[in-house]
Amino acid sequence: MNFLSLLLAVLGSSASLAAPTTSAQNATVDALVYALPLAPYVSFANTGSVVNASNDFVTNTFAHATTLANASFRTVVLPNTDTLYSAALLDLSAGDVVVTMPDRELGRFYVLPFYDLYGNNVCSIGTVTNSTAGKYLIQYRPSNAACDLIPDAGDEYAGTISLPTVYGQILLRIEVFNSSDVDDIVSTIQPHFTLTSLNTPSAGAPPLTSALLNDNLAVDNPSLHLLQLLSRVASFNPAEEASDAEHVAATLEAAGISASSQSYTQPPDLDLASAYTTALNLVQQVPSNPANLLPLGSSAPITWSTTLPSLSGDFHTRYDLRAYISISNAYPPTQLHASHLDPPCFYANQTYMVEFSGKPDVRGFWSLTVYDGEGFLIPNALNRYSLGDRANLTYSDGTPVYDGNGNGAGGDSKAFYMLLQSTDVEVATEWESNWLPTPADGAKFIFILRFYGPTLSLTDGTYEYPKVTAVDANPPLPISE
């Protein structure tokens, strides 16, 4: 079991809230909440990056996926199945980096988001915000994140992205129209997204290496592992908000983290196990806090909601929300680009019918994707993991909802249906096009509804969100009106 799996296993277990009793105890709780996003970053670096002949990270270079995510994909949890990923580890320790963005193909959606070490989406360029082709400068500005998408005076750069941490990452997503479209993206689009390191003054930080993130850390103790890891990187990867940097530094010092020696020493009388339990409970309470959510409609057994736009993607000083999002929904872009709607877990020994009131109105694309209880795609004979505007969805009379390329993505109020049913049960002919396989043997599953380029209708109450109903296997297909 890797460290992230161990962490998620602990998060998923029950834990009683323990009251901290000392200032070191309080500081350690805060330090652990602050450090939790490091776990998915390390997992991403270890599984999603390219390595060289010495089995070390290759930084500031895109690793382009050449196939869509499937049931064997483990680079990130809750992956998209309708975009091709291109991932890069950013290391600004040796100086600035330039990202080149090619001309956008008309009608194709993509988003190029830049994340700091702790999972904050500091900047995104692409179809919605800024599709200007050219070079963008990526620089390290400690505790001063910025996303300046205005060309510089000499027109050398179309914009400047200032990361508040010396390490970060990029997770480019390019829309795929259909399965035959993949080869074209791989050969004609991906190669034109490039990263180039510049010979600029060093940031004074060590290079981003596998040894830095992995060597000589506690393996079987997640709390100790996190604090040791944070001690190595905190001094040159400070808090995003300059106004909070001094407070965070003092908190980490009180927790036993030395900025000068990049080491961790457990304070005397600290109950580390209790501090970790408290930290996890604080993070687990985030999704149940209505102050964090924008309600979008309710239809038993679910209530549709998404993270408030002000808290979406870039979390500033909300370290509890940052931790929850980072470990449960790795690296979402800001809500301007994507709105993720997360219902609770369901069970595969129950069939569910999802009724859409009409086509969601989006500027990009949308999809509903099913995952197992760990956030990975579900094996099935059709290799079908999601349905949306580029699928062969049909109305009840058999006519297509879309043309297979996502055309006609909004404005139609005619109802259509999806069936979430276990791979243990043979699906009825009339449901074949609209069937999403759920796990065999009664295992838990979740599903996520994603909108890329959501319009106002999806957040202002105009659009009626899907109704999810528990039904018998292969129920009669409702008649669309």
Image (spheres, rainbow, N blue to C red):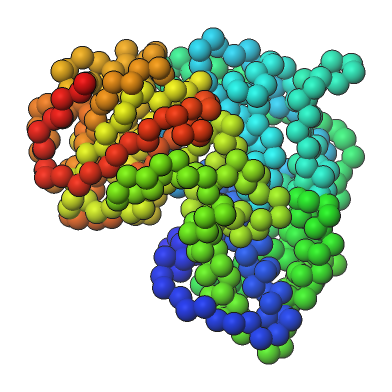
The answer to whether residue 232 is left or right of residue 294 is right
Determine whether 115 is above or below 241 in the image.
Answer: above
Q: Is residue 167 visible?
A: yes
- Where residue 21 sits: x, y (%)? 66, 86
The answer to whether residue 79 is left or right of residue 212 is left
> In percent of the image, x 51 and y 33: which residue is there?
460
Of 66 and 426, nearer the camera is 426
- Where residue 439 sits: x, y (%)? 23, 48
Of 177 and 298, nearer the camera is 298
- Where residue 99 sits: x, y (%)? 71, 27
For the N terminus, the quadrant is bottom left
Which of the 4 image quadrants contains residue 265?
bottom right
> In percent of the image, x 76 and y 50: which residue is there?
240
Of 252 and 300, nearer the camera is 300
Of 131 and 87, nearer the camera is 131
> In percent of the image, x 66 and y 49: which residue is there?
315
